[in-house]
Image: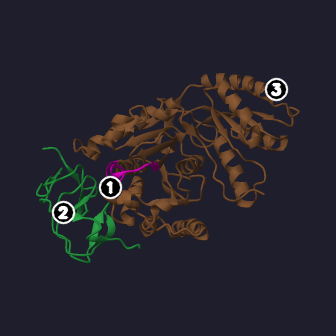
Amino acid sequence: MTVSAIVIHPGDSVACLLRDHRAGECPVLPSGRAAALAVDTPMGHKVALGAIRKGEPVIKFGAVIGHATKDIAPGDHVHLHNLEGGLR
Amino acid sequence: MSGFQGFPRNSGRPGIRNHLVILSMCGLNAPGARRVAEALPEAVLISSPYGRGHVGADKAFHAHMLRAFATHPNTGAVLILAPDDGLCDRMEQAVAETGRAVAGFSLQRWGEDGTAMTRAAVEEGRRLLADLQAVPRAPCQLSDLVIAAECGHSDASSGIVANPLVGDLFDHHIAAGGAAVFAETLEWLGCEPGLYARCVSQDVSDRLRALVRARHAITEAAGHDIHIGNPGPQNHEGGITTLEEKSLGAISKGGTGPISGALAEGEPIPGPGLHVMDTPTLSPESISSMVAGGAQLVIFTTGHGNPYGSALAPTIKLTGNPDTARRLPDQIDFDASEVFRGLRDRASLLPELTGLIGRICGGALTAVERNREGDEVISRLGPSV
């Protein structure tokens, strides 16, 4: 099975998609299948590996890239609608 | 890579090239310098379009950069073209002190006859090139190699594959005793506290803070708010949500190690370890500043591709974008796109990348060298008078 998503740093809470995925598809990580995607999600975008509660940090590159603005479920697309950076 | 075959120098680090540099010190010499360079295609032309009416820090920086190129590890000999004897003699002496062959030509000495002067410079250049070509390579220490990282025309593959791969290389090279540097101050936006925390001492983090503050003061004084529209719609479409995320993708090419030094633009990289340099964002200015600081090799990651590199320091073009690798095979030195296609894991590419670096340090040509896309530029720090 060809890998279709990547976790850049071992501590990350999101994976990056290496191609466009359809809703319901499970991205394939080197370590195995991730949770089924909630919506169609394009290449390069982030999906949640586990649950992230509203207000919790989102980790990519092993660092905080912002905080969840609502509860995020495994397989959710993580983007402008549920993640906000600290700099505005 | 345990070492490389390079060119040991009497003073300073060894070169991975033994270039004849045509150093045109002033805009008055630039047209003549272009004629000399056309007649000596093996030589590297470094030509300043300025050279008079600089004041203050800008004047000191211009002089420092010219001298840094003329005494760079990859410079074997120098052909100086200058407007007057004073400038010419001072540079000639500075180069000679490093043990390099040098020949100076000033318009003043040649009675302002640019035609006769360039003809003589070409003849002298041919002699210097013949001498350089007779110099054999010799074993050099990897710990004397300074690698600079740059990114340009980035896309989603840059932050996900190409920059983290260069970060792996930096971590590996520094663990083996080498030195590395990355730059472009405004690309650290929002991640500066993380960089300060990685500094090896309070002095280094204080210096970095001061450099960042001064760079931001330039944009503020010009009335720019660099946070507006950053990240922009293209970033958002590519999957970048926040400014911290965009910046982390850029600085991931610096690896994960402690920061041993914070340097001003063009400042010498003093020793082993990871260094950060405060530079403008434009790649030519940023790369030339790191090369002037002593980097002998540049790794330039790109998403959509771009042809540019350093003239003096071989520049490896690396992409993680499969379309770019396919579209520009003659411009890309290292294709990391199999990671982006899910066929390879990133760690498995590091030995191939260090292997390529070993070959290029030993004399194999980069795409930039083959395509003659190299240049060096000197930033302006203020207006002329």
Q: Nearer the viewer, residue B126 or A44?
A: A44
Q: Provide the letter of the chain coloured brown.
A: B
Mark seen at residue B116: 3
Q: Which residue is mark 1?
A: B238
Asked if badge 3 and badge 1 are on a common chain, one would say yes
What colour denotes chain A? green
Q: Nearer the viewer, mark 2 or mark 1?
A: 1
Mark 3 / mark 1, whichever is N-terminal: 3
Asked if badge 2 and badge 1 are on a common chain, one would say no
Residue B129's quadrant in the figure? top right
Disc 1 residue type (three-letter): Gly
**SS category of the residue bearing label 2:** loop
Q: Is residue B106 left or right of residue A88?
A: right
Instruction: Farthest residue to the right: give it.
Output: B111
Residue A21, position in %: x, y? 18, 53
User: What range of the chain is rendered magenta?
Assistant: B150-161
Q: Few, some or many C-alpha atoms within 10 Å of disc 2 (few <14, some 14-19, many ≥20)?
A: some
Q: Is residue B135 left or right of residue B96?
A: left
Q: Few, some or many C-alpha atoms within 10 Å of disc 1 (few <14, some 14-19, many ≥20)?
A: some
Residue B360 appearing in the image: yes
Q: Which residue is mark 2?
A: A49
Q: Nearer the viewer, residue B354 or B249?
A: B249
Quarter of the rendering occupied by the C terminus of chain B: bottom right
Q: Are marks 2 and 1 in contact (CB under 8 Å)?
A: no
Residue B102 appearing in the image: no
